[in-house]
């Protein structure tokens, strides 16, 4: 019998389901679509049944091989699709985790006193370090806007769709405060340690103000010490000759200002600054609680009604006639100057 080339390739469409005895070679060739005449041997009337069975068997094997290859291709296609879906799912989980991490690295912005230029710079740094795309950056901005800034974002439906640079420019036009360096420095200089706060709180807020202006480390330590209203504590700090701000913080970690601070101490502080050639700081008094050393805008006591007593915050009498002041006996008296306050 004739040999069949084992390397011949067929598709399922070119192999007939059945070959009957007596079929001519030409018909078999046409039905199989074979282009190689050696695949189908010369068939004539003398071919016996054995050769026909061999041909049918070989063609059936080729048909099954084609089916197996087709099944293999389908399996590969499904595996590729599963891998693609798995990669997309992993990428989505990674983006969610990345967003959850970075949203804790930047503070909220409400448009009420925060430094917009610094906030936007931090936003750009986070985008660069964590390789955030614009959509993730938009989500981060929307998550961190509060107050008037958030109301502004929701006032127009096209703001969140703007290119990031254009969005930040629009934001700057509305919320950036045009504060001069001179005003920032004055605000930094008049900030003093209050009796209602710890030294760490005073240190942190003064350091934040210092970061907005250019000031050296030695100068910063001097300003931190000059903001101590108590003459004794201020003198002790100067004698230590601190060269690092954190050494000063550590030294005053557990120190509390006395609740009574004489105006004489404040006057001495101003006199020292004048003698050193520095600008004299005026005495400030809180309109809300009548205490010396801070303004009403930073007062930590409850807001007092207009015309109310500075001691008990009740309406109907003045501080000089306050029953709470008269009801407490004086246990300790220090040196007083005219106009001094005494904080009970």
Image (cartoon, grey):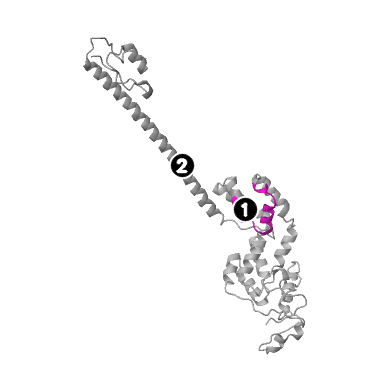
Q: Position of residue 335 (x, y in %)?
A: 71, 85
Observer-nearest of 264 and 344: 344
On the image, which quarter does residue 58 sit in? top left
Left or right of residue 246: residue 296: right
- Residues at marks 1 and 2, CA–CA distance in whole angstroms: 29 Å
Left or right of residue 68: residue 1: left
Disc number for residue 142: 1
Span of residues in magenta: 139-160
Observer-nearest of 98 and 236: 98
Question: Is residue 82 shown in magenta?
Answer: no
Q: Earlier in the sequence, mark 1 or mark 2?
A: 2
Residue placed furthest toward the top: 45
Disc 1 and disc 2 in contact, CB within 8 angstroms:
no
Observer-nearest of 335 and 148: 148
Disc 2 is placed on an element classified as helix
Q: Is residue 12 visible?
A: yes
Quadrant of the drawing holding the C terminus: bottom right
For label 2, the residue is 85
Left or right of residue 184: residue 92: left
Q: Residues within 10 Å of mark 2 (few under 14, many from 20)?
A: few
Q: Position of residue 180 (x, y in %)?
A: 75, 57
Q: Residue at x 23, y 16 (%)?
A: 51
Q: Position of residue 214 (x, y in %)?
A: 68, 57
């Amino acid at each position: 019998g004739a040999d069949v080339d084992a390397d011949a390739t067929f598709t399922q469409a070119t192999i007939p389901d059945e070959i009957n005895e007596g079929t001519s070679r030409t018909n078999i060739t046409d039905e199989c679509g074979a282009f190689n005449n050696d695949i189908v041997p010369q068939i004539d009337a003398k071919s016996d049944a054995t050769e026909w069975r061999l041909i049918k068997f070989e063609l059936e094997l080729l048909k099954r091989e084609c089916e197996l290859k087709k099944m293999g291709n389908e399996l590969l296609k499904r595996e590729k699709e599963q891998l693609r879906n798995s990669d997309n799912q992993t990428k989505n989980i990674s983006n969610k985790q990345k967003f959850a991490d970075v949203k804790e690295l930047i503070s909220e912005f409400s448009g009420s006193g925060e430094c917009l230029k610094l906030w936007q710079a931090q936003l750009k740094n986070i985008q660069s370090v964590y390789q955030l795309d614009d959509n993730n950056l938009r989500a981060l901005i929307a998550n961190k806007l509060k107050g008037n800034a958030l109301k502004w974002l929701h006032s127009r439906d096209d703001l969140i769709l703007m290119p990031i640079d254009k969005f930040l420019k629009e934001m700057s036009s509305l919320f950036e405060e045009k504060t001069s360096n001179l005003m920032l420095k004055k605000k930094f200089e008049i900030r003093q340690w209050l009796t209602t706060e710890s030294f760490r709180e005073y240190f942190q807020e003064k350091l934040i103000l210092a970061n907005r202006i250019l000031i050296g480390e030695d100068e910063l330590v001097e300003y931190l010490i000059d903001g101590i209203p108590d003459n004794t504590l201020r003198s002790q700090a100067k004698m230590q000759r601190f060269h690092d701000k954190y050494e000063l913080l550590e030294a005053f970690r557990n120190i509390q200002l006395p609740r009574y601070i004489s105006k004489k101490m404040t006057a001495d502080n101003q006199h020292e600054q004048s003698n050193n050639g520095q600008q004299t700081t005026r005495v400030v008094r809180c309109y809300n609680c009548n205490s010396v050393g801070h303004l009403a805008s930073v007062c930590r006591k409850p807001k007092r009604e207009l015309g109310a007593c500075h001691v008990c915050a009740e309406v109907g009498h003045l501080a000089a006639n306050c029953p709470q002041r008269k009801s407490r006996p004086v246990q300790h008296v220090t040196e007083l100057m005219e106009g001094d306050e005494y904080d009970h």
